[in-house]
């Protein structure tokens, strides 16, 4: 089976490209790496677009987070999902770097929550970018092992069984 080797980019829409640019270059430290401007085209999902600029901000790994600034008035529509579940997690090399990134982001007037220790494996802080993208800065203390995968399979099977039996309260 073919398996992707890396994440190329994640893309979001922005309502304020100037604020997005400042946040991702100044607060996070990503570099503006590329841009595509189109006056109109038919998208991969079949819509015909208004003019847009698609900008890419590169992380040290070369992977990018990207944003579309679409020349169209619109109001964001809540999708009903839990805000905290959908997030972009960016890895750094140490706990000290997580703390340094948190302070760097705070200096730009952004509220940072945490740190949170996740099972002794991930140490993370969280914030929102100007578009409401939930951002996690994390350090993973060790690689995930075959034992972790086996335990994950047990947890997944138990969760699915509990869901199917109606044993989970929500």
Image (cartoon, rainbow, N blue to C red):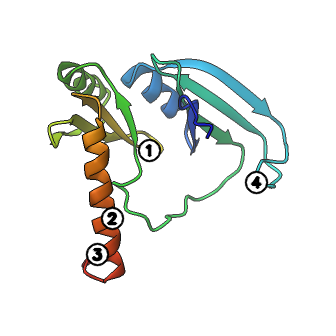
- Mark 1 nearby-residue class (10 Å; few <14, some 14–19, many ≥20): some
Q: Residue at x 26, y 30 (%)?
A: 140
Q: Where does the N terminus fall, quadrant-wise?
A: top right
Q: Are marks 4 and 2 in contact (CB under 8 Å)?
A: no
Residue 39 appears left or right of 140: right
Q: Position of residue 78 (x, y in %)?
A: 49, 64
Quarter of the rendering containing residue 75: bottom right
Of callouts 2 and 1, the N-terminal one: 1
Place of residue 170 in the rendered image (x, y in percent of width and height, measured from the top left): 28, 77
Q: Which residue is mark 4?
A: 45
Judge whether 116 appears above or below 165 on screen: above
The mark found on residue 162 in the picture is 3
Res. 152 visible in picture: yes
Q: Nearer the viewer, residue 23 or 93?
A: 93
- The CA distance from mark 1 to mark 4 is 22 Å
Measured Cα–Cα span from mark 2 to mark 1: 30 Å
Q: What label sits on residue 44 in the rendered view? A: none
Which-is-in-front pick, marks 2 and 1? 2
Measured in 3D between alpha carbons, the distance from the residue under mark 2 to the one under mark 3, in whole angstroms, is 9 Å
Q: Which residue is mark 1?
A: 133
Q: CA distance from mark 4 to mark 3?
A: 36 Å
Task: Say what secondary structure mark 1 lies in.
Answer: loop
Taking 165 as reference, is 63 left or right? right
The answer to whether 92 is drawn above or below residue 137 in the figure is above
Residue at numbered disc 2: 157
Q: Are marks 1 and 4 in contact (CB under 8 Å)?
A: no
Q: In front of the other: label 4 or label 2? A: 2
Q: Residue at x 35, y 70 (%)?
A: 160
Above-or-below relation of 108 to 45: above
Circle 4 Cα neighbour tier, 10 Å, few/some/many (<14 / 14–19 / ≥20): few
The tag earlier along the polypeptide, 4 or 3, is 4
Q: Residue 55, percent across and down?
A: 63, 29
């Amino acid at each position: 089976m073919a398996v992707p080797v890396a994440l190329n980019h994640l893309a979001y829409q922005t309502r304020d490209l100037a604020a997005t640019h400042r946040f991702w270059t100044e607060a996070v430290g990503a570099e503006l790496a590329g841009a595509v401007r189109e006056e109109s085209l038919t998208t991969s999902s079949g819509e015909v677009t208004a003019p847009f600029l698609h900008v890419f901000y590169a992380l040290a790994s070369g992977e990018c987070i990207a944003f579309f600034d679409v020349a169209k008035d619109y109001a964001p529509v809540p999708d009903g999902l839990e805000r905290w579940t959908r997030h972009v997690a960016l890895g750094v090399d140490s706990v000290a770097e997580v703390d340094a990134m948190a302070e760097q982001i705070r200096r730009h007037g952004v509220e940072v929550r945490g740190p949170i220790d996740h099972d002794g494996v991930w140490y993370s802080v969280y914030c929102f970018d100007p578009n409401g993208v939930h951002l996690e800065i994390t350090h993973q203390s060790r690689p995930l092992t075959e034992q972790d995968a086996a335990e994950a399979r047990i947890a997944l099977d138990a969760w699915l069984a509990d869901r199917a039996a109606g044993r989970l309260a929500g």
